[in-house]
């Protein structure tokens, strides 16, 4: 009995769900076919003649492997006045995102097994999508890192070379080398040179237009060069987060044997000085949104394969916090809910293909981080799916934003392309901008842990 016959026998006895009449974005390209979901898995592709308890007509839509946002800050525990896992994950599924990796700069910092378990416990009852959490790489937990990175639900180790505080700041080469020597998994890096940032801080003035002058391209390039040199010495793989400069992109192309590269929708979409003139401190991020020449280099990195992943760097603050006079205003903006609409708009504009977008938001995150059963539409893979209308024209509005921060830098922006449904483990959790059911996300399983 071949696999198809076996699956058909199973589906006659158990509840099967069918998605009909869609364009499936598969490793073989876009295929017009039905897809069957059974027991949370993809049971068949091209399953005409199957009968199902539930059928979703996806005429005019494309089915993508579930979008995975590998960089969010959901602020829980400790900073829940501006975000929490409930609201952050609601925004994720409304935006077509089926899972997230969350960062360790909460209160308390995520540095120990107990810190990680506390977050996992919260997410188990409050997350609407799948989840994992980074543990911070620090002098405080240096000797435990190799064990910590193997814990269930751990996305890996995150290192802040700049723009952090207390035990999370790791700016000295000796400490960075020791962090890289303790463990094997790919280390995620925020690369800004803290010493140069301190030196240049007097340049800030009171004008947010000066943000990319203070945190200049050289601050980013110096840190990137330093950490890659240390990774070469220690043979440790790196994942460089939110690359923002042409200088870094040119440098990184020579180190793809060691480094994977993330860019963000805001660095691909916003540019200075326009965004600061329109949005003020709402456009303030670290590393900064820069001018169009840097943005053009990021797009070149997407086109030539230097870039591997798009992550949102969702990092919300309240409007009251963002209204403080610069530079007392905090850096960060919402992004998980708008990641896919904004990037689909770039697809509609011809800047990248739908298949390349799937590489950057589904296939590559699953491959790079070793996620079991994720990242592609294939029989036996998890039924985590994102259904999109690539022709829908919608206007992003703050009233749609689920984040506790209640704002988006894209408020008022009309985009072409919109997430219509989010399916996780075979269950429909969002359809037509409505969340269905209660939180039922699960911790990601990593085959490298």
Image: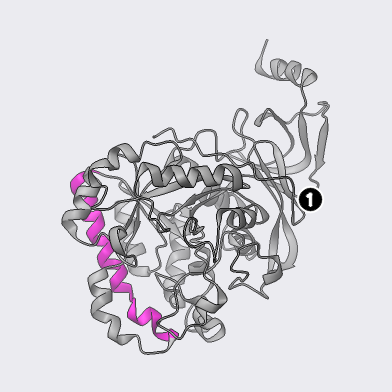
Question: Can I make out residue 364 in this image?
Answer: no
Question: Can I make out residue 201 in this image?
Answer: yes
Q: Nearer the viewer, residue 33 or 406?
A: 406
Indicate yes or no whether the magenta region holds residue 227.
yes
Quarter containing the C terminus: top left
Reply above or below: 395 against 126: below
Give the dominant element type of the magenta stretch: helix, strand or loop: helix
> Residue 443, percent across and down?
52, 39
Which residues are drawn in magenta? 208-235
The quarter of the displayed image where residue 163 is located: bottom left
Quarter containing the N terminus: top right
> Residue 184, percent across and down?
29, 39
Which residue occupies the extreme left position in the image?
Answer: 174
The quarter of the displayed image where residue 405 is located: bottom right
Q: Nearer the viewer, residue 2 or 159?
A: 159
Q: Which residue lies at the image location 53% right of the left edge and 64% below the top edge? A: 265
Q: Report helix, strand or loop for mark 1.
A: loop
The quarter of the displayed image where residue 3 is located: top right
Indicate yes or no whether the magenta region holds residue 221.
yes
> Residue 78, percent across and down?
46, 59
Q: Which residue lies at the image location 24% right of the left edge and 74% below the top edge? A: 196
Disc 1 designates what residue?
Answer: 60
Reply above or below: 166 against 69: below
> Residue 75, percent across and down?
49, 59
Reply above or below: 30 against 37: below
């Amino acid at each position: 009995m071949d696999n198809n016959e076996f699956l058909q026998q199973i589906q006659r006895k158990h509840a099967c769900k069918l998605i009909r009449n869609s364009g499936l974005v598969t490793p073989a390209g876009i295929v017009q076919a039905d897809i069957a979901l059974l027991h949370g898995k993809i049971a068949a592709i091209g399953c005409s003649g199957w009968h199902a308890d539930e059928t979703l007509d996806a005429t005019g839509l494309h089915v993508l492997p579930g979008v995975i946002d590998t960089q969010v800050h959901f602020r829980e525990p400790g900073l829940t006045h501006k975000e929490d896992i409930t609201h952050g994950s609601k925004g994720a599924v409304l935006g077509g995102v089926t899972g997230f990796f969350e960062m360790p700069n909460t209160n308390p910092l995520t540095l120990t097994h107990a810190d990680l378990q506390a977050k996992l416990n919260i997410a188990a009852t409050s997350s609407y999508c799948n989840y994992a959490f980074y543990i911070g790489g620090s002098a405080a937990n240096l000797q435990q890192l190799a064990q910590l990175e193997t814990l269930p639900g751990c996305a890996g180790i995150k290192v802040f070379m700049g723009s952090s505080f207390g035990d999370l700041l790791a700016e000295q080469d000796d400490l960075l080398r020791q962090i890289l020597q303790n463990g094997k998994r790919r280390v995620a890096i925020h690369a800004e040179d803290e010493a140069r940032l301190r030196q240049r801080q007097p340049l800030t003035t009171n004008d947010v237009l000066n943000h990319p002058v203070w945190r200049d391209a050289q601050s980013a390039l110096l840190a990137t060069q330093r950490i890659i040199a240390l990774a070469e010495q220690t043979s440790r793989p790196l994942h460089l987060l939110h690359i923002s400069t042409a200088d870094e992109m040119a440098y990184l192309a020579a180190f793809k044997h060691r480094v994977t590269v993330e860019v963000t929708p805001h660095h691909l979409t916003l540019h200075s000085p326009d965004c600061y003139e329109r949005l003020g401190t709402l456009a303030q991020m670290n590393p900064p949104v820069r001018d169009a020449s840097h943005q053009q280099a990021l797009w070149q990195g997407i086109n030539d394969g230097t870039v591997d992943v798009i992550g949102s760097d969702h990092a919300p603050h309240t409007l009251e916090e963002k209204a403080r006079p610069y530079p007392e205003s905090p850096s960060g903006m919402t992004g998980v809910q708008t990641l896919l609409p904004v990037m689909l708009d770039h697809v509609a504009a011809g800047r990248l293909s739908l298949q390349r977008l799937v590489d950057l938001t589904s296939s590559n995150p699953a491959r790079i981080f070793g996620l079991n059963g994720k990242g592609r539409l294939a029989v036996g893979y998890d039924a985590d799916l994102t259904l999109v209308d690539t022709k829908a024209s919608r206007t992003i509005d703050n009233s749609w934003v689920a984040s506790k921060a209640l704002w988006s830098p894209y408020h008022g922006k009309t985009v072409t392309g919109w997430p219509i449904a989010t399916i996780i483990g075979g269950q429909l959790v969002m359809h037509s901008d409505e969340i269905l059911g209660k939180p039922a996300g699960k911790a990601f399983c990593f085959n490298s842990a």
